[in-house]
Image (cartoon, rainbow, N blue to C red):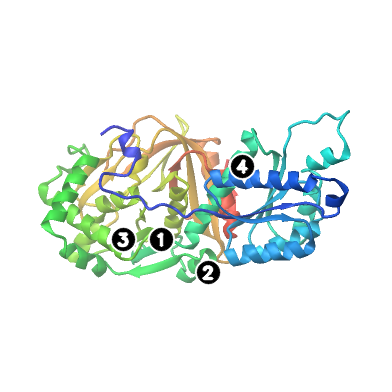
Amino acid sequence: MTATDITRPPAAAESRPGHRARVGVFGIGLATYWPQFEGLKERIEGYQRRVEERVRELGGEVVSAGLVDTEQGARAAGDLFASSQVDVVFCHAVTYATSSTVLPVIQAAKVPAVLLGLQPAATLDYAEIDTAEWLANCAACCVPEIAGALTRARIPYDTVAGTIEEDERAWAKIGAWVRAAGVARSLRRARLGFMGHTYAGMLDLYSDFTAVHAQLGAHVEVLEIDDLGTRVARASEQEVAAKIEQIRSVFAFADPSKDPIAGPVTDEQLDWSARVAVGLDKLADDHELDGLTYYYRGADNEAERLGAAVIVGNSLLTARGVITSGEGDLKTNIAQVLLDRLGAGGSFTEYYALDFDEAFVLMGHDGPGHIAIAQEQPTLRSLKLFHGKRGAGLSVEFKVRYGPVTIVGCTQTADGALKLIVAEGESVPGETFRIGNTNSRLKFSLDPAEFFEAWCEHGPTHHVALGVGHVAGEVRNVARLLGLGFAQVG
């Protein structure tokens, strides 16, 4: 299998698509203009339709309120957006309009607004242009007025200035909002499984399920290890054989490393991991899960064997969009799902070491990884014990793809509010541990010590989601759409 192959979900897996953003779009103008300037309204409506077309091309499901040019029309538009449950509202300032024709729309929609000051032309023939032509290009006139009104109304907004056509910068910003709105919709509707309990003593990880429901709208499905055990016991020999074939096609099998806790991959371990993987597939499908976080300490019993054998199956689940995290860290699972729905992956990760000589941060984790963003074919390594945990078995080892990366932490403030912490960096080549863990060399804009200190200032959870690409802007937009705290480091 090549590195290109494993950027896609493994064979026989069907990725769970995210939700499409539902985008409320309306244009604005001043009704007084229409009888004064013949044809102006029709031109404005044509520009508005073109903006809606382009938003659809970006993947948004457009809910159009058309042209709003009176306060009465604003009320109707707001009711439309509210009843349609839009995720974000785009206000296209096609020409001048009073802010009183905008504020009621956004107030009723109860979602953040993006003010689009998009002109039909990049420049004008200033010596020859008449008033009607100026008004047809007057996208900038009222945007500051609307921004001032929204600020005083305590409504969050963003502004995009540019042109309707041939403006890569402006439409990249608009596209980022469409993608973020889709992710916000996905998170609001996510079903997150929580199996077992949080690793004892990791106080930063403990989560209030009600807070997740209240602040995100996501559902936490509380599961028992027995829910998995029942499904594993029902796995047919045909299902297990197919899963073994899938595992062999996706993973390389490692010879024992110099680590004394490593050993050869045995047929018995492979069979048991495959049976548990079949059970995990059924568990995820039966409960319609978008994510799963788990931990089971064990006590020399069957449940311990189950808990120790989920790494392979959970890595396969993650690659098809059911994102998994260990140690019962629900908050990081949220960050992982967020990154995955942005198309960036989202692998369960923590700080391993700071390299002061070569100026990189080594980050990784034991347990499942997002193998769809691996640099090369991921490896299975047999471990005689899992450090800090009960049990033994097969573990996943790989590096995240070289190039731009983003890490996202999800933590809680002292008052219980969820907060996202983000940094962009680069995954770079170099030696890493061969201990059956994911681990990558990451470089950030600050040197390792300064970066680490700055990150810790935000009271983080010690895990993060690691994804490919630079998507901090989209993550910021998701935070704004969901009303979450946000900080970017570096």
- What SS does tag 3 mark? helix
Q: Tell which circle, 2 or 4, labels the residue nearer the N-terminal end.
A: 4
Q: Nearer the viewer, mark 2 or mark 3?
A: 3
Q: Whole-Å distance between the Cαs marked 1 and 4?
A: 38 Å
Which residue is nearer to you in this view: 168 or 303?
A: 168
- What SS does tag 4 mark? helix
Question: Which residue is the extreme one toward the front?
Answer: 38
Q: Tell which circle, 3 or 1, labels the residue nearer the N-terminal end.
A: 1
CB of mark 2 within 8 Å of CB of mark 3?
Answer: no
The amino acid pointed to by label 2 is Ala
- What SS does tag 1 mark? loop
Q: Which numbered marker is on residue 11?
A: none
**Residue 407: horizontal and vertical position, in percent?**
48, 45
**Residue 90: horizontal and vertical position, in percent?**
66, 52
Q: Tell which circle, 1 or 4, labels the residue nearer the N-terminal end.
A: 4
The amino acid pointed to by label 3 is Ala
Q: Which residue is mark 2?
A: 214
Q: Whole-Å distance between the Cαs marked 2 and 1?
A: 23 Å
Image vertical order of residue 32 relative to residue 304, above or below? above
* Circle count: 4
The amino acid pointed to by label 4 is Lys
> Which quarter of the picture shows residue 284?
bottom left
Q: Which residue is mark 3?
A: 284
> Which quarter of the picture shows residue 155?
bottom right
Q: Which residue is mark 4?
A: 173
- Residue 488 visible in the snapshot: no
Quadrant location of the N terminus? top left
